[in-house]
Amino acid sequence: MELLSTIDMSVTFGGLRAVDAVSFTVEQGQLIGLIGPNGAGKTTFIDGITGFVPTTGSIRFAGQEISRLPAHRRARLGLGRTWQSLELFEDLNIEENLRVAAEPQSARSFLTDLVWPQRSHKGSGVEYAMDVLGIRELALRMPNEVSQGQRKLISAARALAARPQLVCMDEPAAGLDTSESQELGCRLRRIIDAGITIFLVDHDMGLVLNVCDYIYVIEFGATIAQGTPDEIKRDPRVIEAYLGSSAEAAE
Amino acid sequence: MIRRRAAAIGVPRLLLIALGVVLLAFILLNAEYRHNFLTGGGVAEGALIAAIALGVVLTYRGSGVVNFANGAIAMYVAYVYTILRRSGKLFLPPIPNPLKAIEGLVHASGGSKSFTMPNIPVAISFGTTMGFWPALALSLAFCVLLGLGLHFLVFRPLRNAPPLAKVVASVGVLVFLQAIIILRYNTTVQTVRPLPIVHKTQVRLPFIKLAQDQLFVAILVIVFTVLLSMLFRYTRFGLATRAAAENEKGAVVLGFSPDFLAGTNWVLSTVITGLLGILVASVNTTMDPVSLAALIVPALTAALVGSFSSFWRTTLAAFVLGMQVPLVQYISANKSWFPSSNGVFWPGFEYLLPVVVIVLVLFLIGSTLPTRGAISSGRLPFAPSPPAWTIRYGGPALAVFAAICGLFLFSPVYRGALANTLIGIIICLSIVVVTGFVGQISLAQMSFAGISAFVVSKLSFEHGWPFPWPILFGALVALVVGLLVAIPALRVRGVNLAIITFAFAVAIDYVVFGNNSVTGGYNGAPVHVPSWINPNNPGKYHFLGLTAGDGLQPNPMTAIFCLVAVVVLCYLVANLRRSTTGRQMLAMRSNERAAAAAGVNVAGTKLLAFAVSAFVAGIGGGVLAYQAGAVTADPFSYRESLVFFAFAYLGGISTVSGAVVGGFLVEGGLLFTLLEDKFGMSPGMVLVIGGLGLIVAAIQNPEGIAGNIALGGKRLRAWLRGRSTGATDAQPAVAASGPGAA
């Protein structure tokens, strides 16, 4: 089933087309990868889908046109994201970081909370996200007290705590070594198995080629290739633009 | 899409300019209006506003600080000059006198009341009077020192701090300078000698007749505008300042240290502002510390019109804002179509135009304040969730202790101080919600409280509403007004909200609280208070074999009524921090983009915080109305809003316990009553300490007093457990994360 699709989505900064009429589709339950060289427009593409830069063209998510919705409405529809720079809430502890994403605000909860705030969050996305990423023991720590690798996990956990249908992950493997990157790959597959679709943007060719079901390659804001990992490895344009001789190394 | 957005930004701007041009043309083409618009008094006022605004633009371009204190700087320097000329004395800020503490201890321990220790001098004398030139030279030398002092002692240590801290420090400077003048010379109007270098003879120009000295100051301001524009456009210094605003490394490449640039711009700013402050005060021949410092509002408005970068646009806007004053006064006094209050002249409308301009500029054009390239590495005060023991035991124990003190132990003076402290806690709580939880600055909390207080008076006295319903309704009115003020601020962040709320507070002072038919004049607006909490009821109460009260005013039950309100509100605000909404507020304070990605409605949450804050302040105003028995305008002036902000910040801006500490510090509260009663501290010192404390807190200690007590407690517990070495990291040092942290 088609979960997210864009038709001719473009993002323009001044005179520069950072994303140029990209059309793509994400099927439910898949792990979709997006790769491209530095400055190809990968992060801008995520910003466009999740509502952080103005776009033209159509974006459909779960059967609904969302290109005019503000970012927080898209998030509440089940379109989560992580940030390359993590962007944790430094004033809140780890558990509270996750609870912000997990608990939607409502007028009723605002009023009842003023009298008797809910302290338990059993069965909410918070527990689930902490377990999937193995950060339960960090719950009461502050973000600046944990390691950079743990901050990455918290950032991903925060996106998962909202129990999204789709998570866009912006370079989750940046700065990880090979074994950590493989460990991340396993965790991503576990998330997929739990029914959450992932749209993975990364530099790490090994990770993307190993775990993704389907891959898009962009350069200068436009799609230059798409296909399964095997097709991408053989695509001459991709080899020329991005992989070069490292394609053999990845195999 | 982007092109359409650009057009969408351009159209309102063009509309605004067109609106301004049409209005000006209408005024200039109508002889009656033109005559009242082109006046000497208006031009001189415009020149002073322009000078203050030029200083604001200079310091913003040089150091990224929006200087709320620049009006107070003009005022302070004008006082230095005036007093020098009149008595040859250079007055000094109050210097703490350790000997006074000994004196107080002797008095407190029952020693002779005639025992006194020597005082520290309050001024340096240069003779009996001083001529114009030496006084001017000495005053300008003082300006240089003031500029250097502000740079090196206050804003240089804050150069990497979040914008919130910089605004807080500049508000602290405002409160501090104003407090010194009020301590030394009261708020009374001072006369200033005319300038010996130009005459008061009238000059006739096309369309306008004005005095020579008025023309002189106007030309001087225009000359400064030309010089500053040239300095920034054609010199390496100007180029480097512009480069430093974009990226501090840019200035280094040009061979200037950003520090030198910021310091020089500070000195330039204080000298220009001070010089014009002296000259225009001399032209006007009178001045007072409150209205002169409030000129920062039209000055900030002009700077906003000039996008905090164009000297020309700033000066032009400043002249228009100065010249509209006599015109609006004329229209409101003479035109039947203009709003009047019960058929009588309604004063203060000239203060509304800056608010209207700010709202139009911010709302239609969006943020015009250019952001600076420097990465802020400072932090906002830590806002921990209140630990369970404070809610279950600590808070209730404190409340019971306060009740026992109020009922059985305190003398009348301290019962009054207890009530003041309790109301102070409520106002501080309202500031905690908007500034501590959301990181937005509101400088109008006492205006919201005042609006509520006057509504309470009307409902209880004229409409006979029974206690306590007027308080709730008054707070709802404050909530609605708060929302109206906050909506323009939705499109913009922190500093702009501080500007708009400050302008609002000043306008409300003159338009609403300056109107006798609202405030009931000298005696104030009466409140119908039930006798059991009436402060004027010298009650004595017997229950359980105990006697509460000593048969003297104020009624001990008044403080108990305030205490009930405080306990309820502390509980609600503590719960807000522990709730989903509270976490969302703090998430937004940390990082707006990431909060939106986590599904937080950023605009809605900001509005909610503002509404809750105005509501809490409104409850404070209503409680104050019942506690005082009558409502006067004085406790709700813009100065009071600034002072409460200072004490809330000093107490601890981000926690309920901080608000409680802040309440102890307020004017008339328990701490200063004790200091005045036992140690003979003069009442004016409260504000001096408040301003100074705010500056120090902004630089050294954003957690405030309560945060430090909590930190001390943690260290003590760690030490008791024998882990003193690991105690330093007991409190997480929260690193603000980039631009979103503001």
Image (cartoon, coloured by chain):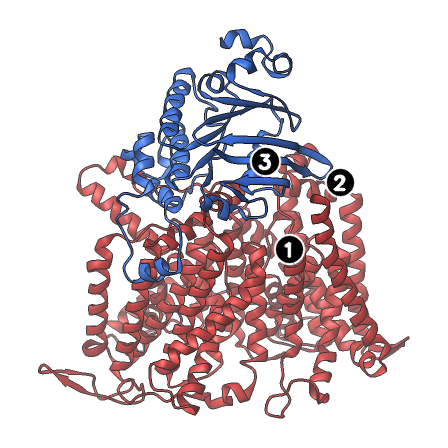
Q: Among the chains, which one is blue? A: A
Nearer the camera: disc 1 or disc 2: 1
In the rendered image of this protein, does residue B674 appear above or below residue B312? below
- In the rendered image, residue B152, in percent from the top left (x then y), is placed at 55, 48
Q: Name the residue located 8 percent from the left edge and 83 percent from the top edge.
A: B545
Q: Name the residue located 35 percent from the left edge and 32 percent from the top edge.
A: A146
Q: Quadrant of residue A25?
A: top right
Q: Is residue A201 left or right of residue A111?
A: right
- The label on residue B236 is 2
Query: Which chain does tag 1 point to?
Result: B
The crowding category of the residue bearing disc 2, from other C-alpha atoms within 10 Å (few below 14, some 14 to 19, many at least 20), is some
Residue at the far front in the pictured view:
A1
Marks 3 and 1 sit apart, C-alpha to C-alpha, by 30 Å
Query: Which chain does tag 2 point to?
Result: B
In the rendered image of this protein, does residue B345 appear above or below residue B447? below
The kind of secondary structure element at disc 2 is: helix
- Identify the amino acid type marked 2: Arg
Q: Is residue B281 left or right of residue B233?
A: left
The kind of secondary structure element at disc 1 is: loop
Q: Among the chains, which one is red? A: B
The crowding category of the residue bearing disc 3, from other C-alpha atoms within 10 Å (few below 14, some 14 to 19, many at least 20), is many
- In the rendered image, residue B184, in percent from the top left (x then y), is placed at 51, 73
The kind of secondary structure element at disc 3 is: strand
- In the rendered image, residue B573, in percent from the top left (x then y), is placed at 34, 61
In the rendered image of this protein, does residue B198 appear above or below residue B490? below
Residue under label 1, please give it.
B366
Residue under label 3, please give it.
A6
Marks 1 and 2 sit apart, C-alpha to C-alpha, by 32 Å
Visible in this render: residue B631?
A: yes
